[in-house]
Amino acid sequence: MENTQQRLSELQQKIIRLKKEKDIAVLAHSYQTADILEIADQTGDSFKLSTAAMELSQKTVLMCGVRFMADTVKLLSPEKTVILPAAEATCPMAEQISPERVYAFKEEHPTYKVVAYINTTTELKAATDVCVTSSSALKIVSRLPENDILFIPDKNLGSYLQKQLPEKNILLWDGCCPVHNAVTEDECRKAVAAHPGAKVLMHPELPAQVLQYADVVGSTADILKYALEHEEDCIIGTERSVRDYLALMRPQQNFYLLSKQLICADMRMTTLTDVYHAMLGECGERIELQPETARLAKHAIEEMLRLGA
Ligand code: 13P
Ligand code: SF4
């Protein structure tokens, strides 16, 4: 263990030196492992990371996360070189509906606005009207002048929105995050019984029947904020890295993972070694987007920023 720590620390030092020498910024989603979060220039949820690169002076950005995050950085900072260190890291939810199906729906239902979770491909974003993230969805959908909405692809986040915004007519698609959707009511009851008094913090990608056990429902950023601003023990209902990070930051508090299923293989694909080799140009993928698709997808992201501000 000590050797591993030492090796990681050396690697972290090398990465920090390379960032300066090569003028590279590292962005890391909160679901990345702590060794990556520690060397990142910016960390956060998908909303924060979508705009973070625009504020950075570096011309090259390494986006540690999954493909849709790197694509979004490229959409908003097209002049930058954007690299996804683990080229195969993708969100399984991103392709659960095809752009063709969205275009067909729009033709059949001209009064509907199509709202897409940011966890979608660039091609899918190009077919939609506005994107949202888990931290901005409620604000954005409530601010839309239209009442008829098709929400894609996450039925769980969509059903959370339906409950919070009964004045809207929200149609759902049958998609979901396979990681969050796997959590069961039985696991919730067991976690609550095992840790009485602990606050239950849940991501809205969890199934609707599970959210009834939550004290707080919010995005990754909301969960981190709540846990860091309170002294209470917490049961964490989102990806395991969030629990691990909190345990590292707050050793005096107890953080329990709601379910052992809450591990996203794609988010964990990127290792510190990948980050190092991607900086040397030895692995990873440089993001290139088809210009017309990028123009349309950027519009949906800009709408997200306009309505979510
Ligand atoms: P956030 O919007 O909370 O960053 O979530 C992204 C994600 O992939 C959740 O599974
Ligand atoms: Fe996609 Fe779920 Fe992984 Fe987030 S946790 S990247 S939604 S599969």
Image (spheres, rainbow, N blue to C red):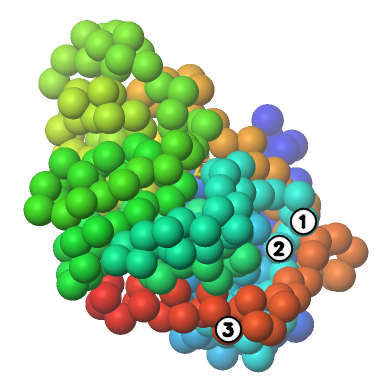
How far across and down, in percent of the image, does residue 259 sit?
42, 21
Which label sits in the foreground, 3 or 2? 3
**First in residue order: circle 3 vs circle 1:** 1
Classify mark 3 as within 8 Å of ligand 1 or not, answering yes or no: no
Residue 194: x and y in percent read 26, 9
Give neighbour class at mark 1: few <14, some 14-19, many 20+ (Cα, 10 Å).
some
- Residue at point 48% right, 39% down? 175
Mark 1 residue element = loop
Q: Which residue is mark 2?
A: 84
Q: Nearer the viewer, mark 3 or mark 1?
A: 3
Look at the picture and state if 198 lies above or below 139. Answer: above
Residue 286: image tag = none
Q: Is residue 70 above or below residue 309?
A: above
Left or right position of 270 against 117: right
Residue at image mark 3? 295
**What amino acid is at disc 2?**
Leu
- Mark 2 residue CB less than 8 A from any atom of ligand 2: no
Mark 3 residue type: Arg
C-alpha separation, residue under disc 3 versus residue under disc 2: 21 Å
- Contact, CB < 8 Å: mark 1 with mark 2? yes
Q: Quadrant of residue 64?
A: bottom right
The reply to whether residue 115 is in sight is no
The residue lying toward the viewer, choosing from 140 and 287, is: 140
**Residue nearest the viewer, comparing 35 with 183:** 183
| Residue 303 occupies quadrant | bottom left
Residue name at image x 37 percent, y 16 percent: 184
State the separation of the CA atoms marked 1 and 2: 6 Å
Q: Secondary structure at mark 3?
A: helix
Residue 117 falls in which quadrant of the image? bottom left
Q: CA distance from mark 3 to mark 1?
A: 23 Å
Q: Which residue is mark 1?
A: 87
Report the residue at 24% width, 59% height from top: 148
